[in-house]
Image (cartoon, rainbow, N blue to C red):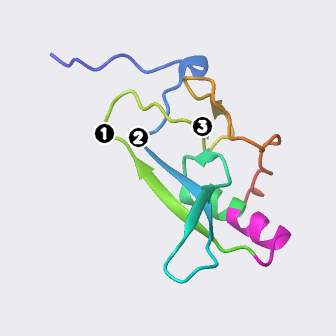
Amino acid sequence: MSSKSPPHSQDQQAAPLTVFYVVETTGHVSGERHHRVCSHMFETRLQAHTELTRLELGNASGSFSIWKGTTYIEPAEWLYDVIMADNTVIPARRGHLLPGLHTRPTPAPRA
């Protein structure tokens, strides 16, 4: 007998165990770096890449990269909202939004 719970409805959709997000790296002293999360969490690498491109175009001097986060605790609980591939938003369970980010990312064009 399986101990898994039934699939969640749209309004109770679970956050993914793996997310992708954009990080800005700064550091002016040799050997010293600072990392700052500067995007929402995304379900797919493609979504994060779209956000990376948007951030790079808006800030040519920044050093941005895509990071991957994985949890092995189910259900997953992230500190920030997670934007799923279909653009639904899974709110952070603790109600914490990414500071300073007040707009949702622009959805990628559909092929």
Residue under label 2: 17
Q: Residues within 10 Å of mark 3 (few under 14, many from 20)?
A: many
Task: Locate the C terminus by quadrant.
Answer: bottom right
Residue 92: image quadrant is: top right
Front position in the image: 28 or 91: 28
Task: Locate the N terminus by quadrant.
Answer: top left
Q: Residues within 10 Å of mark 2 (few under 14, many from 20)?
A: some
Residue 71 placement (x, y as % from top left): 36, 42
Q: Earlier in the sequence, mark 2 or mark 3?
A: 2
Kindly report the secondary structure that dominates the magenta region of the rendered protein: helix
Q: Earlier in the sequence, mark 1 or mark 3?
A: 1
Disc 2 + disc 3, Cβ < 8 Å: no
Q: Earlier in the sequence, mark 1 or mark 2?
A: 2
Which amino acid type corresponds to the residue marked 1 in the rendered image? Tyr
The vertical placement of 98 against 32, above or below, is above
Q: Is residue 58 magenta?
A: yes
Disc 1 + disc 2, Cβ < 8 Å: yes
Which amino acid type corresponds to the residue marked 2 in the rendered image? Leu
Residue at 50% over, 35% down? 78
Residue under label 3: 80
Front position in the image: 29 or 82: 29
| Label 3: which secondary element | loop
Residue at 54% over, 35% down? 79
Q: Residues within 10 Å of mark 1 (few under 14, many from 20)?
A: few
Whether residue 109 sits left or right of residue 30 in the image: it is right
Q: Which residues are magenta?
A: 52-61
Residue under label 1: 72
| Label 1: which secondary element | loop
Is residue 46 in sight in this rendering? Answer: no
